[in-house]
Image (spheres, rainbow, N blue to C red):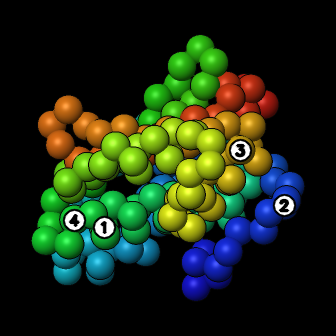
């Protein structure tokens, strides 16, 4: 329940080496009853033993909010795809759904337009990404639905290795 509480404005991360696949798997498992009830099929495409350096509770909260957001977008079922990429400069964790996608105003708000208000849960995710030196990106998927990507600097991965 504490994962749904507001995120403190200036909390510094308690850096811990953690396995990203395990953390995401735990969050998905905790939401399994809701996913089943709504007819949502989750697919995780994260390598085993994916180390990152992050604040465990903050990252768990961000993943939880992104998955709950996807569930809200698919009240009658759909597909939830969670994947991870390791680029030369960043680690990216993407949560994509097969819902209706995002309207242009919401996309503009999510991708950093000044003066735009975000829904509280997505603002929390954005702030968690920023406290980790990263950012939150949003896009509509070509096949439909929306994708939210947490982008963290590669240095976080290198420090964890």
Q: Position of residue 61 (x, y in %)?
A: 59, 65
Q: Secondary structure at mark 4?
A: loop
Characterize the local packing of mark 1: few (<14), some (14-19) or many (20 or more) Cα atoms within 10 angstroms. Answer: many
Mark 2 element type: loop
Where is residue 146? Give x, y as percent.
30, 46
Q: Quadrant of residue 4?
A: bottom right
Disc number at residue 74? Answer: 4
Tell me the residue that label 2 is attached to: 11
Disc nearer the start of the sequence (2/3): 2
Determine whether label 4 and label 1 are within 8 Å by CB.
yes
Residue 105 in the image: state x and y as whole percent: 39, 48
Question: Which badge, 4 or 2, comes first in the chain's sequence?
Answer: 2
127 sits to left or right of 77 = right
Q: CA distance from mark 3 to mark 4?
A: 27 Å
Residue named by callout 1: 71
At x 74%, y 55%, the residue is: 55
């Amino acid at each position: 329940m504490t994962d749904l509480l507001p995120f403190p404005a200036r909390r510094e991360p308690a850096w811990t080496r953690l396995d990203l696949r395990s953390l995401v798997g735990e969050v998905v498992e905790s939401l399994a009853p809701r996913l089943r009830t709504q007819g949502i099929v989750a697919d995780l495409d994260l390598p085993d033993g994916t180390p990152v350096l992050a604040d465990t509770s903050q990252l768990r909260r961000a993943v939880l909010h992104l998955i709950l957001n996807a569930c809200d977008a698919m009240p009658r079922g759909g597909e939830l795809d969670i994947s991870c990429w390791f680029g030369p400069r960043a680690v990216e964790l993407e949560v994509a759904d097969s819902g209706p996608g995002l309207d242009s105003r919401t996309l503009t708000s999510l991708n950093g337009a000044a003066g735009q208000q975000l829904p509280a849960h997505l603002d929390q995710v954005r702030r968690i990404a920023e406290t980790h030196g990263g950012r939150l990106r949003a896009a509509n998927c070509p096949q439909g639905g929306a994708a939210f990507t947490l982008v963290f600097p590669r240095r976080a991965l290198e420090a964890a290795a």
